[in-house]
Structures are given as C-alpha cells and as structure tokens.
Image (cartoon, rainbow, N blue to C red):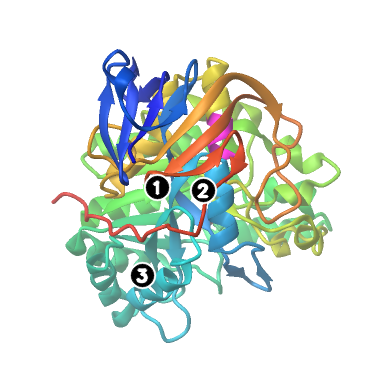
Amino acid sequence: MDTLVRGGTVVLESGRLRADVLIRGSRVAGLLDPRESAGFKARVIDASDLLVLPGGVDVHTHIGIQFGEFTTRDDFGSATRAAAFGGTTSLLEFAFPEPGEDPAEAVERRISQASGQAVIDFGFHAAIAQHADADALAGIERAAKLGAPTVKVFTAYRGIMMLELGDVMAVMREAAKARSLVMVHAETEAIVERAVGELRERGIADARHHPQARPGIAELDAARSVLRLAAETGAAVYLVHVTLPEVAEEIARARADGVRAYGETCPHYLFLDESVYSTPHGERFVCSPPMRSATAARGLWRTLGTSLTGVHSDHCCFDSEQKKVYASDSTRIPPGLPGVETRMPLLISAALSGRLSMPDVVRLCSSEPARLFGMQGKGSLLPGMDADLIVVDPRARHRLDGLHMATDYTPFAGMEIRGRIETVVAGGEVLVSAGRWVGEKPAGRYIRRRRLEA
Ligand code: URP
Ligand code: ZN
Ligand code: ZN
C-alpha cells in the first residue's frame, strides 16, 4: 500500500511548500497538492503543522574502528539505529585497509560487515594509510569501480594513518585519473609533535591543554599544502572537519582559482569552543583538530553554504571510560566524539532559532553532500528520489538525553534543543514513529556512488 505523509510543510534546498508526500515502494512518487490527495487510499502519516525534510546524509562517520589500543563501542547495527533516531537516513563510512589489503578489498570487507546490520543505506570511502605503494594507488580505481569514488588520507597521526606529502600527491594524481574525490584530514604532524613536546617538558600535556597540543597553525599549514597539491595535480579535494574560518577562506580562494576544493565542518566546532577542555571532564571532548576559540566558532557559522558546503558528524563513538584512561596525556586519549545522532537535531534547532534557514539545513546536511558524493536518489524529496524523510515538530523543546549511541555521554549534554524528530522513514519503511523505534529487520542497502563529473 502507498504511504502519504499528509498535511506538512515540505522543506527542500530551494525553499518550502505545502505538499503531501506520496511514497510508493521505496521511492517518492509525488508531491501532491493537499486538496488532490484527500481521497487517496494510503497509509497516512499525519504531518499536520509539522515539517517534512529529506533524511540526513552524513558523509563522515567512524563505526566499529580501532584507533591505537581503543575500539569504538558501536557497530553498524547500533550506529545506524542511532543515526536514524537522529534523522540521518544514509551515511558514508571509511574502509581502512588491514595489513595486506588494498583499498578496494577493504571496501568489499566493510560492505559485507554492514550488510544485514545497517538499518539505513550506507556507502564507503576508500582510504590509504601510512604508505601509498603501487597496490594501494591501483586500489583507488578499483574502489571507484565498486562505487566508492572517494579516498581518504591523513597528514596527521604518524605511525597510525599519516601519509607524507609526497604520498598525498601520488594519491591525488591517481584520484584525478579515477575521478575520485580526495578527502583529507589536514594537520601538519611536525607542528603538532613540536607543540606536544613543549607541553610535555612543562608537564602539562593533559586534556586541559589539548588545544595547544594541536594548534590552529597546524591545520592552516596542512590545508594550504594540500590545496596547492590539488592545484598541481588537478585532483578534487575535500577538507574534513574544518575548525577555522581561515581554512574555509583558503578553500574558497582555491576554488576561485579553479581548484575543485570543498570542505565540511562538524557540529562540535560550531556549537562548542575550547572552554570545554577546562570543564571537569575535558578529556571527553578530545578530538582532532580540537575545538577552537569562541570567535573562530562564530566565524565558522558565516562560512556555511559558501566556502564550506557540509556539516557532518565525524562520529567516533568512544565512551567516558575509554576517554579517561589517559586523561593526563591528551595524545593518548582516543580522539573523536559521538555525534551521528545529534547532528541533525542541533542543526534543525539552530534553524528554528534563526541562525540559518531550514532550506540551508537541507542543503548542508542532505542535498549538497548527496550531489558531491555521487549518491543518486538521496538528498531531496522530488518525485523519483528515495523515500528517505523525517517529520519534525518545530514547536517541541527538549534536552539531548535518552540518546541511542553506544556510549554514555554526549558533548552537547544539557543543551536545549528546539524541534523534535517525530517520524523517520528510510527507503519507504517507517523506522521511527512518535519518537519510538518501529523498524523491522535491518534493510540498509549499499550505496553504489557515481564518480565525479569529468
Ligand atoms: O578526533 C577525531 N576526529 N577522530 C576521528 C578520526 C578523525 O581524525 O577523523
Ligand atoms: Zn580526522
Ligand atoms: Zn573523522
């Protein structure tokens, strides 16, 4: 039977309209004038006085990964369920090769891990860590053939993930040939190492001093180098988790010079600042790069929709026990914050408070990432698109508690949130109704993505 989401205001990146959403199977069959749909025989989702948005697309998560001696607490089942509760109906995760694997083999392994567990659609970015040898480089094209036309590299985390700039350049050359997007974690490790050394000498390398351990100049320096390499190689480049307006400006400048340069930020860099490291559990906020000054956070808001085209979670689900093991040495605290469930509520709340518009939220969190990352069918509710949508009560107010991520804390505890996600539909199936889980067996499908336009 068809489903009709009736009585709501549909929000698209281009604006809002009063329309009923007709769902047939897993697709949107039409946006109907409410007067037309009155006599329709369909299962009805009542959206009277509510907002109907395309489901969120989160292109930056880390699920079930090991980082040094720590493994995140979640798996594809728990993380995608939490994502759905938070209004995200598709996500892109990383496939880090294990020893002996090439990037494409890692993508295949991760597809089988997620299949049968994920409750929302998922895709993968290929990744190259430590050495970009010939096999790894050839894996970029093979991964693109599998529908993973993105490759992640790190200029930080020596001995775990880091690639030297020469290797980053080699990755860019191959990626340009394969029409794959190069995603970069940009921080200059040598600057971080120097800063950490100095803090250690003074005996203050704890969580409280984490921002000094990874200073802004490390991010700015790496961003500049990487953008120059993109200009040189013709690669398209995407800077993940940008924390500084100056870095966003570098991206905009590179784009104005003809480089295909893009960037995202994350909710924690918009809603929090470095003062969190002075709170009693500063270690719970340790991530790379760190939160910056309140001025930088305010500046970042102004880059949204222009130099930065996405807001993604960088979800990395450690719990408070794991975070506190090395609280006195910020370099050993597992980096990353849980956030796949809180990204959309935070952005929707910001829109309801007037910080940006609701179409901006759709553009930043759904439409633009779906387009850039080649996710056909995602990011819009126009007829023919996947029936991935959320119904939001704009009048509700609540605190971020009772979350579903596999951890015991959120960095946004205590924050008042405007708007509540009442219903979540993914692939035409209702997963959340009146805020409760009603999904049946995991039906998330692998998203085979398109390469970049030539
Ligand atoms: O601290 C972070 N961001 N952890 C996740 C891994 C990464 O660098 O994106
Ligand atoms: Zn990173
Ligand atoms: Zn990340």
Q: Which residues are magenta?
A: 341-347
Q: Residue at x 59, y 49 (%)?
A: 82
Left or right placement of residue 129 versus residue 175 in this view: right
Mark linked to residue 246:
none
In the figure, residue 108 lies in which quadrant?
Answer: bottom left
Q: Ligand 2 within 8 A of label 1's CB?
A: no
Q: Position of residue 366 (x, y in %)?
A: 39, 38
Q: Position of residue 86 (x, y in %)?
A: 56, 40
In the figure, residue 36 lies in which quadrant?
Answer: top left
Q: Position of residue 19 (x, y in %)?
A: 33, 19
Left or right placement of residue 197 versus residue 25 in this view: right
User: Quarter of the image containing the N terminus?
Assistant: top left
Q: Earlier in the sequence, mark 2 or mark 1?
A: 2
Amino acid carrying mark 2 in the image:
Glu
Residue under label 2: 219
Amino acid carrying mark 1 in the image:
Arg
Residue under label 3: 167
Q: CA distance from mark 3 to mark 1?
A: 16 Å
The residue tagged with tag 3: helix, strand or loop? helix
The residue tagged with tag 1: helix, strand or loop? helix
Mark linked to residue 224:
1
